[in-house]
Amino acid sequence: MIKLSRDQFDTIVAHARSGFPNEICGILAGRDGQVEIVHQARNVARTPRTRFSMDPQDILGITDAIDEAGMDLLGFYHSHTHTQAYPSPTDVSDWPAHWYPDALCLICSLMEEDRPQLRAFHIDAAGEIEEADVEIA
Ligand SMILES: [Zn+2]
Protein backbone atom coordinates (compact mmCIF):
# COMPACT_ATOMS: atom_id res chain seq x y z
CA MET A 1 0.00 0.00 0.00
CA ILE A 2 1.19 3.49 -0.82
CA LYS A 3 -0.56 6.65 0.33
CA LEU A 4 -0.58 9.95 -1.52
CA SER A 5 -2.29 13.25 -0.97
CA ARG A 6 -4.63 14.56 -3.65
CA ASP A 7 -2.03 17.26 -4.42
CA GLN A 8 0.70 14.67 -4.95
CA PHE A 9 -1.57 12.66 -7.24
CA ASP A 10 -2.33 15.86 -9.19
CA THR A 11 1.40 16.63 -9.38
CA ILE A 12 2.13 13.24 -10.93
CA VAL A 13 -0.74 13.58 -13.42
CA ALA A 14 0.38 17.11 -14.35
CA HIS A 15 3.92 15.81 -14.85
CA ALA A 16 2.61 13.01 -17.08
CA ARG A 17 0.52 15.45 -19.13
CA SER A 18 3.43 17.88 -19.46
CA GLY A 19 5.55 15.18 -21.08
CA PHE A 20 2.88 13.88 -23.44
CA PRO A 21 3.33 12.14 -25.89
CA ASN A 22 6.54 11.06 -24.20
CA GLU A 23 6.70 9.02 -21.04
CA ILE A 24 7.86 10.82 -17.93
CA CYS A 25 9.36 9.40 -14.75
CA GLY A 26 10.19 10.18 -11.16
CA ILE A 27 10.72 8.88 -7.66
CA LEU A 28 8.42 8.97 -4.63
CA ALA A 29 9.95 9.44 -1.21
CA GLY A 30 8.39 9.32 2.22
CA ARG A 31 7.93 7.32 5.38
CA ASP A 32 5.77 4.34 6.34
CA GLY A 33 4.21 4.16 2.91
CA GLN A 34 3.11 7.80 3.01
CA VAL A 35 4.54 9.87 0.16
CA GLU A 36 6.12 13.12 1.30
CA ILE A 37 8.04 14.24 -1.78
CA VAL A 38 7.47 13.72 -5.51
CA HIS A 39 10.86 13.94 -7.22
CA GLN A 40 10.74 14.42 -10.98
CA ALA A 41 13.50 12.84 -13.06
CA ARG A 42 14.48 13.05 -16.70
CA ASN A 43 13.56 10.32 -19.14
CA VAL A 44 16.67 9.71 -21.25
CA ALA A 45 15.31 6.78 -23.28
CA ARG A 46 16.07 6.91 -26.99
CA THR A 47 12.42 6.24 -27.74
CA PRO A 48 10.67 8.17 -24.94
CA ARG A 49 7.23 7.72 -26.49
CA THR A 50 7.19 4.09 -25.57
CA ARG A 51 9.98 3.64 -23.04
CA PHE A 52 11.47 5.27 -20.03
CA SER A 53 14.99 5.22 -18.75
CA MET A 54 15.64 7.39 -15.73
CA ASP A 55 18.67 9.66 -15.98
CA PRO A 56 21.37 7.98 -13.82
CA GLN A 57 22.53 11.38 -12.51
CA ASP A 58 18.99 12.17 -11.44
CA ILE A 59 18.72 8.82 -9.66
CA LEU A 60 21.96 9.52 -7.77
CA GLY A 61 20.94 13.05 -6.80
CA ILE A 62 17.46 12.03 -5.73
CA THR A 63 18.53 8.95 -3.76
CA ASP A 64 21.15 11.07 -1.96
CA ALA A 65 18.48 13.64 -1.09
CA ILE A 66 16.18 10.87 0.17
CA ASP A 67 18.94 9.43 2.37
CA GLU A 68 19.83 12.86 3.75
CA ALA A 69 16.19 13.52 4.59
CA GLY A 70 15.98 10.19 6.42
CA MET A 71 13.18 9.04 4.15
CA ASP A 72 12.55 5.84 2.24
CA LEU A 73 12.43 5.42 -1.50
CA LEU A 74 8.82 4.26 -1.77
CA GLY A 75 8.54 3.90 -5.50
CA PHE A 76 9.49 4.79 -9.04
CA TYR A 77 6.75 6.22 -11.22
CA HIS A 78 6.40 6.65 -14.96
CA SER A 79 3.63 7.38 -17.39
CA HIS A 80 1.95 5.36 -20.07
CA THR A 81 0.52 7.70 -22.64
CA HIS A 82 -1.45 5.24 -24.74
CA THR A 83 -1.67 2.04 -22.77
CA GLN A 84 -3.19 0.93 -19.51
CA ALA A 85 -1.52 1.41 -16.13
CA TYR A 86 0.06 -2.03 -16.06
CA PRO A 87 3.77 -2.93 -16.30
CA SER A 88 4.91 -3.68 -19.85
CA PRO A 89 7.28 -6.60 -20.50
CA THR A 90 10.10 -4.02 -20.70
CA ASP A 91 9.06 -2.46 -17.40
CA VAL A 92 9.37 -5.89 -15.81
CA SER A 93 12.67 -6.85 -17.45
CA ASP A 94 14.24 -3.46 -16.61
CA TRP A 95 12.89 -3.33 -13.07
CA PRO A 96 15.71 -2.93 -10.46
CA ALA A 97 14.29 -5.50 -8.03
CA HIS A 98 17.75 -6.45 -6.79
CA TRP A 99 18.66 -2.87 -5.88
CA TYR A 100 15.29 -1.72 -4.59
CA PRO A 101 13.41 -4.81 -3.42
CA ASP A 102 10.79 -2.80 -1.50
CA ALA A 103 10.15 -0.05 -4.04
CA LEU A 104 6.87 -0.05 -5.93
CA CYS A 105 6.49 0.44 -9.66
CA LEU A 106 3.84 3.13 -10.12
CA ILE A 107 2.29 3.79 -13.50
CA CYS A 108 0.17 6.79 -14.42
CA SER A 109 -1.91 6.08 -17.51
CA LEU A 110 -3.25 8.83 -19.74
CA MET A 111 -5.01 6.37 -22.02
CA GLU A 112 -8.34 7.87 -21.01
CA GLU A 113 -7.67 11.57 -21.29
CA ASP A 114 -10.19 12.69 -18.68
CA ARG A 115 -9.63 9.82 -16.32
CA PRO A 116 -5.92 9.47 -15.52
CA GLN A 117 -5.15 6.33 -13.56
CA LEU A 118 -2.40 5.61 -11.09
CA ARG A 119 -1.68 2.01 -10.11
CA ALA A 120 1.17 0.49 -8.12
CA PHE A 121 2.86 -2.87 -8.45
CA HIS A 122 5.45 -4.86 -6.65
CA ILE A 123 7.75 -6.64 -9.10
CA ASP A 124 10.14 -9.21 -7.70
CA ALA A 125 13.46 -10.39 -9.11
CA ALA A 126 11.74 -13.30 -10.85
CA GLY A 127 9.41 -10.90 -12.66
CA GLU A 128 6.34 -11.73 -10.62
CA ILE A 129 3.89 -8.82 -10.57
CA GLU A 130 1.61 -8.12 -7.64
CA GLU A 131 -0.66 -5.08 -7.47
CA ALA A 132 -0.48 -2.87 -4.38
CA ASP A 133 -3.17 -0.51 -3.14
CA VAL A 134 -2.87 3.19 -3.90
CA GLU A 135 -4.69 5.35 -1.36
CA ILE A 136 -5.34 8.95 -2.35
CA ALA A 137 -6.51 10.95 0.62
ZN1 LIG B 1 5.95 1.36 -18.66
Image: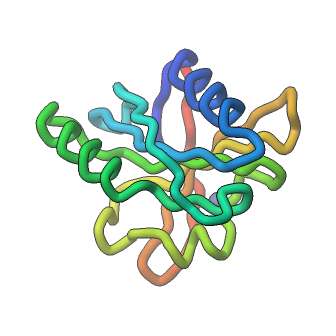
Residue drawn at point x = 66 percent, y = 57 percent: 48
On the image, the x and y values in percent for residue 24 come to 59, 45
Q: Picture quarter containing residue 55? A: bottom left
Report which quarter residue 103 is drawn in.
bottom left
Q: Is residue 32 left or right of residue 82?
A: left
Quadrant of the picture in which ligand 1 is shown: bottom right
Q: Residue furthest front?
A: 46
Give the x, y percent position of residue 130: 57, 63
Residue found farthest to the bottom: 126
Could you say which is closer to the camera, residue 23 or residue 80? Answer: 23
> At 58% across and 59% down in the image, what residue appears?
52
At a point 54% along the width and 16% down the height, the residue shown is 7
Q: How many marks?
A: 0
Q: How is the image coloured?
A: rainbow
Above or below residue 3? Residue 128 is: below
At which x and y percent is residue 35? 39, 30
Residue 90 x %, y %: 62, 74
Image quadrant holding the C terminus, namely top right
What residue lies at 58% left-to-right and 31% top-to-bottom?
Answer: 12
Compared across the picture, whether 37 is left or right of 126 comes to left
Task: Give the image quarter of residue 40.
Answer: top left
62 sits to left or right of 70: right
Residue 23 drawn above or below residue 118: below
